Image (cartoon, rainbow, N blue to C red):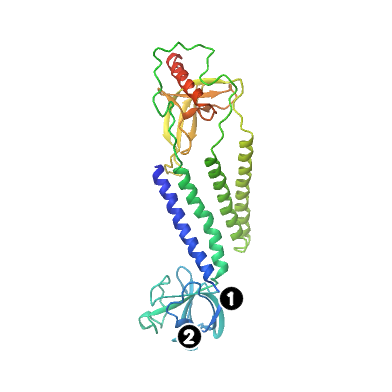
């Protein structure tokens, strides 16, 4: 599953990235100002080339030729004669028999082909004046390409973040839950005053730089996408557009506030205090935690609360180390009835232990499991 979602992220990165690069190449090819052309000159170009940002100076859109609807709104325009033709998309100009100007990006495709797939009454593609049809994307040009670059950049980054998260290097750790717990045979009986974890005050292990960079990048990226959506809503749909601005803007602000909160929590990381209790609690269920019906690698652990015995659960993300499971029981730490239960993970995360301390804790855990009665 990790490999599959890693490839999904890589595909997103390459796909959106390729689209973004294509837009950047267009930006590099565009002239400083749109090139003035007559419809006859434009129609004569079988290969307009990249960056064909033009201004048609004499295009006519007769009212007798109605606009056609496909994936966009299309109009058939003419130059001085009906043999000089251009199919324009996204035209907002009213129909007129008088020549007018129109700015956009020019391209040429085989007659009757391309993205339009339209039929204009009285002008069948089988009798088109040329073997290609000339199309103009009205309003296209540097401004639109910049908009696509800004939009595609965060989606490209999302793909990279997904791939990096699922293909995160997995370091082997020689602890319970990953390798068998050592046998308690020959070890001294468990004493009531003992603890599995070191007696000293514990500190939480710092998140790796890898994880922190991914977290910050993901939150900033999603905030950027929501901010872009808020900006895109401004000029559209009247009051409904402003509702979109408010909703997307508020979500972006919440993500940024969450980023600040996470950063502050990293600064103030603290482990449970001296009042610390350890327990092995029955693992009641171990199930897949679906995200919108999809298995993304998260797992849910249902266990008996160490204080009340009631059912409790915790979800462990795909990027997190698995909990320590010893003979069907979870090793947990808590500070009493009113404190949260901490599932201790492989490597005794989230606590910062030295290599020797982890080895000793593993031996004590084996004795703890062997000599502490099961419920």
Q: Quadrant of the N terminus?
A: top left
Q: Is residue 280 visible?
A: no
Q: Relative to 345, is 259 above or below?
A: below
If you read the primary sequence from the N terminus, does the residue marked by circle 1 or circle 2 appear first? 1
Rendering coords of residue 283 (x, y %): 44, 25
Rendering coords of residue 303 (x, y %): 47, 26
Determine contact: label 1, label 2, CB under 8 Å.
Answer: no
* Residue for point 58% across, 22% down: 335
Rendering coords of residue 293 (x, y %): 43, 43
Q: Is residue 290 visible?
A: yes
Q: Which residue is mark 1?
A: 33
Q: Which residue is mark 2?
A: 40
* Residue for point 46% across, 20% down: 365
**CA distance separating discs 1 and 2:** 20 Å
* 85 relative to 203 in the view: left or right: left
Q: Relative to 21, is 309 above or below?
A: above
């Amino acid at each position: 599953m990790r490999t599959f979602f890693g490839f999904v992220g890589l595909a997103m990165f390459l796909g959106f990235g390729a689209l973004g690069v294509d837009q950047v190449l267009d930006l590099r090819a565009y002239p400083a100002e749109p090139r003035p052309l007559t419809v006859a000159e434009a129609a004569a170009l079988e290969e307009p080339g990249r960056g064909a940002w033009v201004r048609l100076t004499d295009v006519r859109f007769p009212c007798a030729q109605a606009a056609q609807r496909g994936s966009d709104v299309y109009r058939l325009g003419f130059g001085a004669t009906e043999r000089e033709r251009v199919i324009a998309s996204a035209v907002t100009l009213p129909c007129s028999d008088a020549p007018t100007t129109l700015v956009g990006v020019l391209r040429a495709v085989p007659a009757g082909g391309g993205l339009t797939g339209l039929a204009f009454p009285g002008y069948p593609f089988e009798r088109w004046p040329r073997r290609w049809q000339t199309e103009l994307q009205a309003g296209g040009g540097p401004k639109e390409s910049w908009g696509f670059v800004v939009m595609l950049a965060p989606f490209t980054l999302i793909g990279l973040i997904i791939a990096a998260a699922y293909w995160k290097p997995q370091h082997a750790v020689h602890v319970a839950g990953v390798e068998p717990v050592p046998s308690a045979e020959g070890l001294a009986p468990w004493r009531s005053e003992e603890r599995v974890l070191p007696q000293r005050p514990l500190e939480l292990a710092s998140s790796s730089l890898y994880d922190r960079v991914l977290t910050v990048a993901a939150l900033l990226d999603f905030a950027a996408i929501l901010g872009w959506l808020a900006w895109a809503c401004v000029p559209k749909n009247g009051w409904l557009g402003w509702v979109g601005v408010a909703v997307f803007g508020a979500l972006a602000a919440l993500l940024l506030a969450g980023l600040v909160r996470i950063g502050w929590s990293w600064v103030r990381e603290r482990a449970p205090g001296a009042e610390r209790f350890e327990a092995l609690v029955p693992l009641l269920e171990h199930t897949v935690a679906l995200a919108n019906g999809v298995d993304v690698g998260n797992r849910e652990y249902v266990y008996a609360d160490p204080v009340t015995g009631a059912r409790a659960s915790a979800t462990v993300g795909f990027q997190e180390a698995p909990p320590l499971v010893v003979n069907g029981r979870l090793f947990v730490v808590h500070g009493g009835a009113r404190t949260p239960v901490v599932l201790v993970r492989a490597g005794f995360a989230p606590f910062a232990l030295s290599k020797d301390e982890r080895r000793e804790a593993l031996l004590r855990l084996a004795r703890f499991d062997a000599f502490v009665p099961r419920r």
